[in-house]
Image (spheres, rainbow, N blue to C red):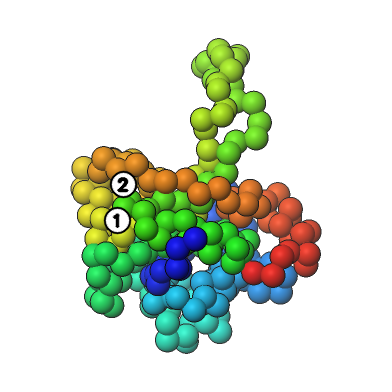
Amino acid sequence: MSRSPSFWVVIPAAGVGSRMRADRPKQYLQLGGRTILEHTLDCFLGHPNLLGLVVSLAEDDPWWPSLACASDSRIHRAAGGAERADSVLSGLRLLGKLGAAADDWVLVHDAARPNLIREDLDRLLAELANDPVGGLLAVPVRDTLKRVGPDGRVRETVDRSVIWQAYTPQMFRFGALEEALAGALARKVAITDEASALEWAGQSPRLVEGRADNLKITRPEDLQWLAQRWSNRPEA
Ligand code: CTP
Ligand code: MG
């Protein structure tokens, strides 16, 4: 395995969490006595190869200043945007001002994925350290997949052996990622993750298999599921 490279991190955390239907954005809901966002940041802040971290936040975010980590000098605050990709690009622009070089690695990770463990992070770093493009943690789909018609009836069963779910962190070179994301957004291409921006730019990101429980908290049942298991989680 290659030596683990140094890396920057961008955490998009400017979403409103509409599908959670809570009284605040989901990254500020509690899990095991702390906020989801604090758990998400922990995995990176505990890593010796971290160069710096940007968190993209809504401009009127009243919750961030009360977190203990808000005063951590390794964390910088960028302005979130209308879509996740805008928040990520805003974070990348700030990384540029902080001194990120074109060849530096950047890891982008959803604020709403608090269950990333160090083992997965280290595997991603090691496996992509010498990759010309970069890539992402991903999970092979487990269920049988159906293509459905507008009438709600099955048209066909899809070959699931070639279908993976895209997770985060996603790890790309700073210069290539900023250019691809800015280019795709300027042309109004639908970008739902960093890999799709690189794909738009003609690259083929590599998949690194990760744990399925590094899930993105999206709906109330996701948080209930994770909260029940939280005390037994492997050391992050
Ligand atoms: N995000 C962001 N800026 C946006 C939208 C989303 O930084 N304009 C972030 C979210 O805070 C989250 C991650 O991107 O950490 C993944 O997005 P998602 O799960 O869709 O979160 P929300 O957009 O907050 O949730 P919903 O779509 O249910 O409203
Ligand atoms: Mg969203």
Tell me if mark 2 has few (under 14), some (14-19) or many (20+) residues whose alpha carbon lies within 10 angstroms of its own.
many
Q: Position of residue 157 (x, y in %)?
A: 59, 18
Marker count (numbered):
2
Front-most of 25 and 36? 36
Residue at image position (52%, 15%) is 149
Q: Does the numbered disc 2 mark a residue whose Cβ is under 8 Å from ligand 1?
A: no
Residue at image position (60%, 70%) is 39
Front-most of 22 and 138? 138
Front-most of 161 and 181? 161
Residue at image position (51%, 72%) is 44
Tell me the tag on residue 86.
none
Query: Would you name the residue on which mark 2 appears?
Result: 198
The quadrant of the picture occupied by the C terminus is bottom right
- The answer to whether residue 64 is seen in the rendering is yes
> Dot 2: what SS?
helix
Residue at image position (71%, 57%) is 226
- Per the model, the C-alpha gap separating discs 2 and 1 is 7 Å
Amino acid at pointer 2? Leu
Q: Position of residue 2 (x, y in %)?
A: 45, 63
Q: Position of residue 15 (x, y in %)?
A: 47, 58
Contact between marks 2 and 1 (CB within 8 A): the answer is yes
Judged from this view, the residue extending furthest toward the front is 1
> Dot 1: what SS?
helix
Q: Position of residue 132 (x, y in %)?
A: 31, 52
* Residue 105, picture quadrant: bottom left
- The answer to whether residue 24 is seen in the rendering is no
Amino acid at pointer 1? Leu
Tell whether 205 sits left or right of 18: left
Query: Would you name the residue on which mark 1 appears?
Result: 177
Tell whether 193 sits left or right of 175: right
Front-most of 220 and 3? 3
Q: Earlier in the sequence, mark 2 or mark 1?
A: 1
